[in-house]
Every structure is written in C-alpha cells, then in structure tokens.
Amino acid sequence: MLRVLLCAATLLACAAGAASAGTLEDVQQREKLSCGVNAGLIGFASLDSRNEWTGFDVDLCRALAAAVLGDPTAVSFVETTNATRFTLLLSGELDVLVRNTTWSFATDVGLKLDFAGINYYDGQRFMVPKTMGVSSATELSGKRICMQPDTKTAMNLDEYFARNNITYERIEVENLAQAQTFYLEGECEVFTADASSLAAIRAAFKAPGDHLLLGDVISKEPLGPVVRQGDDDWADVVRWVLNALITAEELGVTSVNIDEMRESTNNPEIARLLGTEGRMGELLGLDAEWAVRAIRAGGNYGEIFARNIGETTPIGLSRGLNLQWTNGGLLYSPPFR
C-alpha cells in the first residue's frame, strides 16, 4: 500500500486539474461514463456468454449512466487491477471506480480520494480445502498462505496472527489470479481475501463444494464507489445515485412497480425520490427523473444484490451486514428531504 501511495502522489496535481474541469459536464459532453471494475470477478464484474458485462458493480455503473445520460448502456467498462486502479482514476482515465476497494484512512486521506458511500460491507476471511479438516483460523498455524506483499490483506493477516500467536509460511504472489492458481495447485494451503472475493473466486472452481470459507472475519472492509477528490458536484451525483437504490429498497420501490408508485404514492419521501415533488434533480445538475432511470436500469439495491450475488446465485452470499437497517443490517441512506 505504501508503494501505491507514493506512486499515486505524483498524480495528485493532475487529478486536481481534472476534477476542476467538472466530471459531470465531461461525462455529459462525452455521452459515455468511464467506469473502472475488477474484471473477471464473477458476480461483480465479468463478461457473460453474450460478451456483455454483468454483475453487482456493473449494475451500479449502469444505474449511474442511466441517471446522468439517460442510457444504462452508455458505459465504457475499464478493467483495473489492485496496481492500476488508483492511477487510472487519478489520471482522469476513469470517471468512477466501482470495484472491491476498501474505504480506509490510507485510500481516503493518503490518496486524496472521495468515497461516495458504501455499497458492500465486507471483511477478510480464509478459504481452505474441506479435506484440511479445520474450522477456525486459529487452526492455521504453520500453513502456507498465498499473499500479495505490501497490501492491506497482508497487513490484516500479519496483525491478526500476531495477536493470536499464530505463525504461517508466506507464499508471495503478484495478484489474486496467481494466488488462485497456487491454491488450486497446492502450493498454498490457504487463500485469504475479502469474503465477497473468495465467494466469487470459489464459484468459478470446478468443484466449489470442496472448499470452505472459514467463519472468522479478521477485518472491516467497507467497499464503495470512488471518485477523485475536489469535484464535489460529481461526488454528490455518484453518492445519491447509490443512495437512491438503497432508499428504493427500503421504501418498496422496485423496477417492476416504479411507474405505479410514481403515479399513486402518498408517501412524501417516495415522491421526492421519484421526482414528483421537490427539486432534487435540479440541485444535482440533473432532471427530475434521474432516480427513476437509475432504479429502472437494474432495480433497487436488493434486486441488484439478489440477481448477481445473492443466495440463489452461484456466489451464494447472504445479505448479512448488507441488510437494510430495518432488518438488522447496516445498510441505509441519508433521508431524501
């Protein structure tokens, strides 16, 4: 992470210039949104059999394009890695980064980035072959663990094992793809990453049922869309598009009933969300139906989650912390008023 901070620091002056130009205006003039994703992470951002982008993160990009441009397909998806994601964003090649990126002090303050909310509450966990016969991270002493050096994943692991007096053998890898290969070939006995990434990676295995995600969660990993610091208007647009999807689920507005709700609601917050009352679109630099288009593009937050990574998909993730606050989760939007 330190090397990333030092490299990215050289781009900050350029980033300030790019931000001052106004990303919202740039996107509208270009008629295309440039969205950075973690390509190949099944359930989050990958190409389907028709060579079309699909996934949880992809749907947020499409909702943003729908809100800003009126067209959910007006997106240029840019493949990013842990090494390139911040450089591409700070250089202006991306308008927004929507992939597994943790909101931390280092990424927020150190890189001068703005997180436009949290779209997934995650945590670092461990995956092991079921044949290993372990059920807890405290049983991993002496195991070979694949690790990208100088990453928050490595830092979390070292700190957790040090606190629990656990030793391990570090097998250094260049990226998650190499870690996956080493794990499947047996060079590593344990695979560690954010739980959502592990679930997505496991879903692509020939025998996913042969591998177990241990229950131990060793870190907090709040993931969310990222923009360059210094362009508050654009940050507001990204933030409130995400909030619109979250609020829509809370209020029962779906891609199926949105037209009916817009015409018949007597709930003032729904009316404000869907643009029949107030001037929220105008304040964002958009029209009154921005949120309607965002929700219609792929559904509310719950619809997007269930379709891409929910319990009935190969990824098989439960909502957990990502349940609405009314159902015991951490998910909620500031009010639309």
Image (cartoon, rainbow, N blue to C red):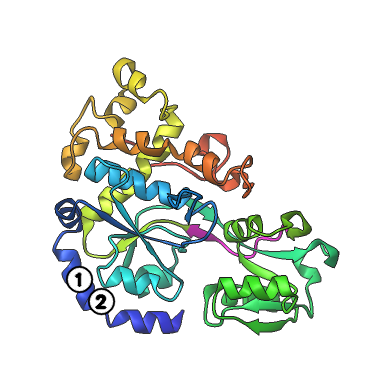
Secondary structure type for disc 1? helix
**Magenta-colored stretch includes residue 216:** yes
**Residue 279 at x, y = what percent?**
18, 33
Vertically, is 225 above or below 318?
below
Q: How many marks?
A: 2
Secondary structure type for disc 2? helix
- What residue does disc 2 label? 12
| Mark seen at residue 16 | 1
Q: Is residue 69 visible?
A: yes
Vertically, is 170 above or below 216?
below
Residue type, numbered disc 2: Leu
In the image, taking residue 326 as reference, residue 205 lies left or right, namely right
**Magenta-colored stretch includes residue 281:** no
Vertically, is 297 above or below 162?
above
Asked if disc 1 and disc 2 are in contact, CB closer than 8 Å, the reply is yes
Which region of the structure is painted magenta?
214-222
Q: Main secondary structure of the magenta part?
A: loop
**Residue 293 at x, y = what percent?**
30, 35
